[in-house]
Structure formats: C-alpha cells, structure tokens
Amino acid sequence: MKLSVIGCGYLGAVHASAMAELGHDVIGIDVDAAKIGRLAEGQAPFFEPGLSEVLTSAMKSGRLRFSTDMADVAGAQVHFIAVGTPQKPGSHAADLRFVDAAITALLPHLSVGDLVVGKSTVPVGTAARLAEVIAASGTGASLAWNPEFLREGFAVKDTISPDRLVYGVPSGEAGKHAQALLNQVYATAIAAETPLVVTDYATAELVKVSANAFLATKISFINAMAEIAEVSGADVTQLADAIGFDSRIGRRFLNAGVGFGGGCLPKDIRAFTARAEELGRGESVAFLKEVDAINLRRRQRVVDLTVSALGARAYGRKVAVLGLSFKPHSDDVRDSPALDVAVQLHGLGAEVVATDPQAIDNSRARHPQLTYAVGIEETLRGADAVVLVTEWPEFRAIDPAWAASIVRTPTVIDGRNTLDATAWRAAGWTYHGLGRP
Ligand code: UGA
C-alpha cells in the first residue's frame, strides 16, 4: 500500500521505517528539515535499537522516502498522524497544536476514499472533532484512530509485532472502509493473529490514555510501598517479588526506584486529569494526581539520600551520576528522573559528573551547566558518592571492587534497586537502595 506518515519523531520515524520494512511504500513528512535531512540519508535522528538497520534496509529497497513538503503525500491512500502532543506550557492539558497543524496542512492533499489515521496520544473527544473538520473539507476522506503502544527501546519490535491492535472507526460503511484499509496496512500482524479491538473513536482514545495511566499507577503503587518500607524496615524488592507471583498482579512494572519519566507517562496522566476535569469527572481520576505526586517524591528521595550520605553537605562534593536517559536503551531525556536528580544535586552545590551511554548530547542541550563524562571510570574517579539512576546494562555490570578503588568514598545510592547489594557491600561499599533496609 502507499502510506504517508506525518511527524517523524520517536513514533513516526519508527512507524514509517517499520511499515516500509513490511512491504508498504511510505513517505515520511516532517516540518523539521534537519531531521528529514538525516532520515533521507538513512540516519536515525535519535537512538533506538534496531532502527538504523530497518531504516537502511527500507531506504535501499526504495520503499521509504522522506520530505518536508506535504504535497509529497500525493498517491498515498492512508495517512498516519504521528506528531507529538506535549504538555501545554503552564497547564496540565495536552497541547494539540501539532495535531491540528498536521491535519490543516494535509487537508488540501486528500482525495476521495483516503483514510487519515491518528496515532498520536490525544484527549478523548479529539478524534470526533477532527472527523468533523475532515468531513467539512469535502475531500471525501475519513478518519480512524489507531493508538500506538510501542515502548522506547523496543519500538521497532513493538511496531512490527504489536501485542494488540486497536481501531477506532466511525459507524456504518465508513467504518467498514476504514477497517478494511487498516487490515491491509497491518496484514502481517493480522495474519499472526494479533488481538484486534475494533471500536469507536472515544474508546480507542481512552484505551491509550488508560493503559498509560494504569502503568503509571502500578509503578507509583510499588513506590508508595517503598515509602512505607522505608519507615518500617521492610524490603520493597522482596515485597514486589512476593506479590508479583500472584498472576492477577504480575511482577512486571513493579520495580520501585526513582520513578517513571519520559515523553509519555508523566504528561499523559496529567492530560488525562485535565480532560476528565473538562468533562466534569475530575474526581474519577483524581488518584492520578497522587500517582504523579508519589512519582515526583521519589526523585526528591534520591536527592535527599545522596545529601544525607554526604553528611548533609553537598556543596563542593563530587557526585558521580550514572544515567541520564529516562530509561535504558534510549537517548530520550524528556522528563527524565535521572537528569532531574543530576540537576537538583548540581543546584545544591555538588560537583556533578554525569554519564550515559546515549543521552549525553540531549542532556547537554538542555542542561549545559552539568559536567558530562564519556566513560564510567572518568565519572567515578574521586567521587564522594555514586548515584545510579538509569539501569543501563553497563552500569549493572560495574565490578564493585574495581569501582571502590577509583572513588574517594565508596557510597552508592541505587536509584533503580538494580545492583547486587550483597556484592557491593562485600566490596566495601555503603549501599542505599530505595525502599530497602
Ligand atoms: C510507555 C508505555 O509503556 C508504552 O506502552 C506507550 O506506547 C508509550 O509510553 C507511549 O505512550 O508512547 P515508554 O515511555 O517508552 O512507554 O516507557 P516505559 O517502558 O513505559 O517506562 C516508563 C518509565 O517507567 C521509565 O522511566 C521507566 O524507568 C519507569 N519504570 C518502568 C519504573 O520506574 N518501574 C518499572 O517497574 C517500570
């Protein structure tokens, strides 16, 4: 099929490449000329495992092109909207200006029978509004909402083999037409018997935000247990293992630590709360404010533990920060707990030296005041405290005896409860986990 993907960020660049890999003919559009320039040369504009390979092979096949000119969508029958919906400045609501701009720019290029497919995470009610805009344009195109559940770090795999497909479609013939086209787009996943839910716009929009709200709640639940563990002497990691054996609960997403970040979970729960309030049902998701508050308290806890480990005086002390991205296998520092902790410690006068396998450039662009080091050894040398805030495999693999010989004081704050506490203590370290004795 001929497809267009509008917006080539973390979502769109992967979607465009994966769709071309699956055999479709794809044009990726973005207003950012630098990004399109890199993509057109077959270079991934951000770090995502497997993306470069898929991008290169799709470009070689001739099935993938990139452009800044919306007119180049001509000939495509299905148009994916994959632009960002960040938090609005000064508000908790989602900023829909990029979605609206994408639709406005696309309208003049739509033809009868074309399908516009929203993938961006939007407040419930957005698709119905956009469907009216498309209907009023008289182009004969229609709209479906097809939320995306990919995880950064696994984005290519999640796009090629999704764990479910959700189509929000209009009723009647238009809905059947939309479903038929989407089934062609996702023919490989459909053939693999991927679960499919065909529903209305509102449900499709809500599936996405409620999935992220559930995941955020699960993480904040275990982090709340960590807070209780801290005042009662219990160990939250053992608690998570024990409750996780109950298949109704499950162990995944029960890792207590510095909390969730990234471009999705934090802003999505805030936008959900804002939208529910607009709909007069703020009380239904008021607990998400608590989920957010618990999450932000965990960042403060890591900072407090570090300052206390430094004898209540951070000023002038060297703190080695391991990790800057919001999670491993990503260079994304949007709302990253790791970067936030580094910045807060710097603000308290500590001499922060931070490292990350992929996220130094993005971190430096946002926070040039921090000192960044490329290697683990350079980061640790002479440190008065070590703070691990992103569980990259290379940090987990650090030999504690070797590390103890490099730092000034062998004190580690494990903000992800990911190190072997026994091994680190045996190597002479004072080990502090979160929610652990
Ligand atoms: C999340 C969802 O998992 C995806 O399904 C969704 O498609 C995506 O948002 C989106 O809306 O686009 P992602 O932001 O890539 O994906 O990251 P997650 O793997 O969900 O992790 C989010 C944060 O939670 C990270 O900071 C991670 O370190 C933290 N986390 C995760 C924990 O603190 N504890 C856990 O047990 C699991």
Image (cartoon, helix red, strand yellow):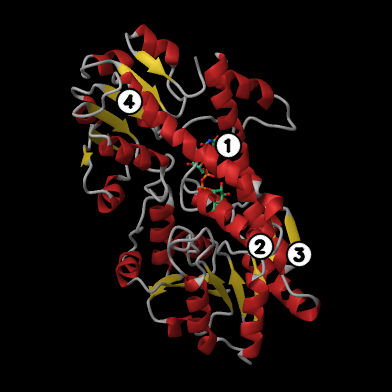
- Reading the image, the residue beneath label 2 is 205
| Residue occupying the point 57% across, 15% down | 232
User: Is residue 29 shown above or below 353?
Assistant: below
Given residues 348 and 194, the one toward you in this image is: 348
Residue 173 falls in image quadrant? bottom right
Q: Are marks 4 and 2 in contact (CB under 8 Å)?
A: no
Binning the other alpha carbons within 10 Å of mark 4 as few (below 14), some (14 to 19) or many (20 upward) gives: many
For disc 1, the marked residue is 220
CA–CA distance in space, label 4 to label 2:
43 Å
- Residue 199's disc is 3
Q: Amino acid at mark 4?
A: Val
Is residue 141 in sight in this rendering? no
Is the shortest distance between ligand 1 and the CB of mark 3 under 8 Å? no
Label 2 crowd bin: few (<14), some (14–19), many (20+), radius 10 Å: many
SS type, badge 2: helix
Separation of residues labelled 2 and 1 (CA atoms): 23 Å
Quadrant of the drawing holding the N terminus: bottom right
In this picture, residue 7 sits left or right of residue 199: left
Mark found first going from the N terminus, 4 or 2:
2
The image position of residue 130, as x and y in percent, is: 62, 77
Q: Residues within 10 Å of mark 1 (few under 14, many from 20)?
A: many
Q: From where the camera sits, is residue 418 visible?
A: yes
Residue contact between numbered discs 2 and 3, judged by CB atoms under 8 Å: no
**Front position in the image: 323 or 188:** 323
